[in-house]
Image: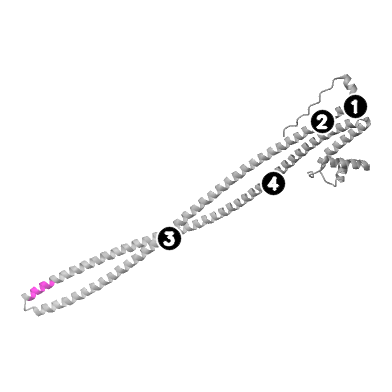
């Protein structure tokens, strides 16, 4: 990129100094005279212009043109040269700005691509971690499922045992009921027997003592049987209470097993929700990749348009260079007409001045 401030006058002065010193006038030597500043692409057009001007001055001195005419031609040429120089400087500035903008956009694109790649790597790492956690969750669920099956088997076994206990309690209740019925039947029979013995005692006074002894013996036996039945009844009552206590304990165990089963079901539902969350994250990652690909395509299209704009500017610069050559040719024609004005007047009428071609619109 050329240093801002290098003008035609600087290049012309440096070339004149090299000529006075007897050194060849080249782009490298002129750049050294300028203190190693300015680019070769900027110095070369100026040096070519100086050589053309220098050739024109040499030709004018050889033809010995009038100073006023030479001054007018020189002023016209310098004005045209300054205008061409301004246009060239503006075109070069626009070109540099376009190149700088393109480089900035390219840098931004590279930065966004790097960020996209980094985000993609981070998303892949998150996805891998999620898959690893998902596998661990599945393993945990499998273990919990096996534990749940084992607990269900235990619950089934406990239910079976509880059913057996209930059947046993039912049998004991039936036995207890039968014992109560037997005891009531024995009491009724005893009452009837006592009534019959009283009637026999009243009817048979002579056998009173014998019947009384017999009755006392029978009563003692009956009391012993009653005590035995009362002891059996008390034992049956204790067994019934123990059975009720065992039934309550079994019910508590059943409620605990049901609570554990409900907890396992809730954990299974939580694991399914985690799986849904992982799938949603994977879908979001795929959508982000699609958006980044779309943005990349848009930036590539923008880069292609900028490249076309650069080529168009280069074509405009070539057109302006041709216009510059046309102006130089016009100046040479004017110089030739001024050298032989009389011959030109006799041979043909004075030609109208050529209109300067307008530069192409940027």
Most extreme residue toward the bottom is 209
Q: Closer to the camera: disc 4 or disc 1?
A: 1
Q: Residue at x 58, y 53 (%)?
A: 126
Residue bearing the label numbered 3: 260
Q: Are marks 1 and 2 in contact (CB under 8 Å)?
A: no
Q: Closer to the camera: disc 2 or disc 4?
A: 2
Residue bearing the label numbered 4: 107
Question: Reading the chain from its start, which is encountered first: label 3 or label 1?
Answer: 3
Q: Closer to the camera: disc 1 or disc 2?
A: 1
For mark 3, give the secondary structure. helix
The location of residue 128, given as percent across then percent down, is 58, 53
Q: Residue at x 46, y 54 (%)?
A: 269
Q: CA distance from mark 2 to mark 4?
A: 42 Å
Question: Reading the chain from its start, which is encountered first: label 1 or label 2?
Answer: 2
Q: Quadrant of the N terminus?
A: top right
Q: Classify residue 228 as left or right of residue 108.
A: left
Residue bearing the label numbered 2: 327
Q: CA distance from mark 1 to mark 2?
A: 19 Å
Q: Closer to the camera: disc 4 or disc 3?
A: 4
The location of residue 69, given as percent across then percent down, is 88, 30
Answer above or below: position of 290 versus 68: below
Q: Closer to the camera: disc 3 or disc 1?
A: 1
Q: Are marks 3 and 2 in contact (CB under 8 Å)?
A: no
Question: Reading the chain from its start, which is encountered first: label 4 or label 3?
Answer: 4
Residue bearing the label numbered 1: 339
Q: CA distance from mark 3 to mark 1?
A: 119 Å
- Number of marks in picture: 4
For mark 1, give the secondary structure. helix
Camera-side residue: 260 or 207?
A: 260
Q: Residues within 10 Å of mark 3 (few under 14, many from 20)?
A: some
Question: Reading the chain from its start, which is encountered first: label 4 or label 1?
Answer: 4
The stretch of residues the image draws in magenta is 193-201
């Amino acid at each position: 990129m050329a240093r801002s401030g290098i003008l035609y006058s600087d290049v012309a002065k440096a070339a004149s100094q090299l000529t006075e010193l007897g050194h060849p006038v080249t782009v490298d030597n002129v750049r050294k005279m300028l203190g190693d500043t300015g680019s070769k692409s900027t110095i070369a057009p100026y040096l070519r212009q100086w050589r053309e001007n220098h050739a024109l001055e040499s030709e004018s001195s050889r033809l010995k043109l009038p100073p006023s005419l030479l001054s007018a031609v020189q002023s016209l040429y310098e004005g045209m040269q300054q205008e061409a120089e301004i246009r060239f400087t503006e075109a070069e500035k626009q070109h540099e700005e376009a190149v700088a903008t393109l480089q900035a956009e390219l840098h931004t694109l590279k930065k966004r691509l790097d960020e996209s790649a980094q985000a993609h790597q981070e998303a892949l790492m998150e996805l891998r971690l999620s898959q690893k956690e998902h596998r661990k969750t599945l393993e945990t669920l499998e273990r919990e499922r096996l534990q749940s099956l084992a607990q269900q088997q235990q619950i089934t076994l406990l239910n079976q045992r509880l059913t057996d206990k209930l059947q046993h309690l039912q049998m004991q209740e039936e036995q207890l009921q039968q014992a109560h019925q037997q005891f009531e039947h024995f009491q009724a029979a005893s009452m009837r027997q006592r009534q019959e013995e009283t009637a026999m005692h009243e009817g048979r006074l002579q056998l009173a003592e014998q019947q009384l002894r017999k009755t006392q013996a029978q009563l003692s036996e009956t009391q012993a049987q009653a005590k035995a039945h009362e002891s059996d009844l008390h034992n049956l009552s204790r067994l019934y209470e123990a059975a009720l206590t065992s039934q309550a304990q079994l019910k508590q165990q059943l409620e605990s097993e049901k609570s554990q089963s409900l907890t396992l079901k809730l954990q299974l539902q939580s694991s399914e929700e985690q799986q849904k969350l992982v799938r949603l994250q994977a879908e979001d990652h795929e959508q982000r990749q699609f958006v980044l690909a779309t943005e990349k395509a848009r930036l590539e299209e923008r880069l292609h348009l900028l490249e076309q704009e650069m080529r168009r500017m280069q074509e405009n610069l070539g057109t302006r260079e041709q216009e510059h050559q046309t102006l130089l040719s016009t100046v040479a024609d004017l110089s030739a007409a001024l050298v032989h004005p009389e011959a030109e007047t006799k041979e043909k009428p004075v030609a109208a001045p050529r209109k300067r071609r307008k530069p192409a619109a940027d």
